Image (cartoon, rainbow, N blue to C red):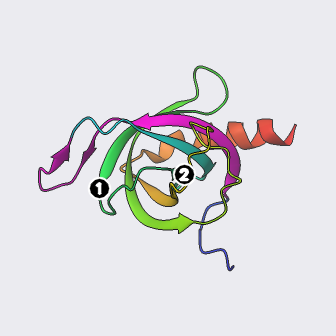
Amino acid sequence: MQEKRREKRIELTLFLKISSLFKQDNVLVHDIEAPITVINISRGGIGFLSRSNLPIGFYFNACIQLGDEDAKLYCVVKIIRVEEVKDTSYVTYNSEEKTGQSIYRYGCEFVGMAPVLSYIFDDFEKSMEE
């Protein structure tokens, strides 16, 4: 597959929960409690897995910690792509295998993140190389 991202992807595993989704036209979905497993991150966005079927075009708030306590990204993430994954070898938030339940792979972009926060990615990439 040809890489289409402008920014380098960093492989990692983070476990988060999405508690609500929203859209710009004041559509709000509460009490989702969708566990997700972040599998890669770049300056442009994240890729994650979930057993929950989340709608494209919706946003959620995230706090992503890369490295030490000071390297937290508070950001808004927009879901832009989803595909059902047949390979269930991924480690997910709740790794307990549930027969017949689909796993979805999502592609998301960061929305409105300040460019000054790129130092967090630089520091994290450097720590991964060491």
> How many labels were placed on the picture?
2
| Magenta stretch holds residue 17 | yes
Q: Position of residue 68 (x, y in %)?
A: 65, 23
Instruction: Name the residue type under label 2.
Output: Phe
Residue at (36, 55) in percent of width and height:
54
* Residue shown at the point (26%, 35%) measured from the top left: 31
Quadrant of the image containing the N terminus: bottom right
Q: In what quadrant of the picture does the C terminus appear?
A: top right
Direction left: furthest residue: 26
Q: Residue at x 54, y 51 (%)?
A: 48
Q: Which residue is mark 1?
A: 58
Q: Nearer the viewer, residue 65 or 105?
A: 105
Residue 36 or residue 86, whichever sits in front? 86
Residue 5 in the image: above or below residue 130:
below
Q: Please, what secondary structure does the residue beneath circle 2 have?
A: strand
**Disc 2 from disc 1: Cα separation:** 15 Å
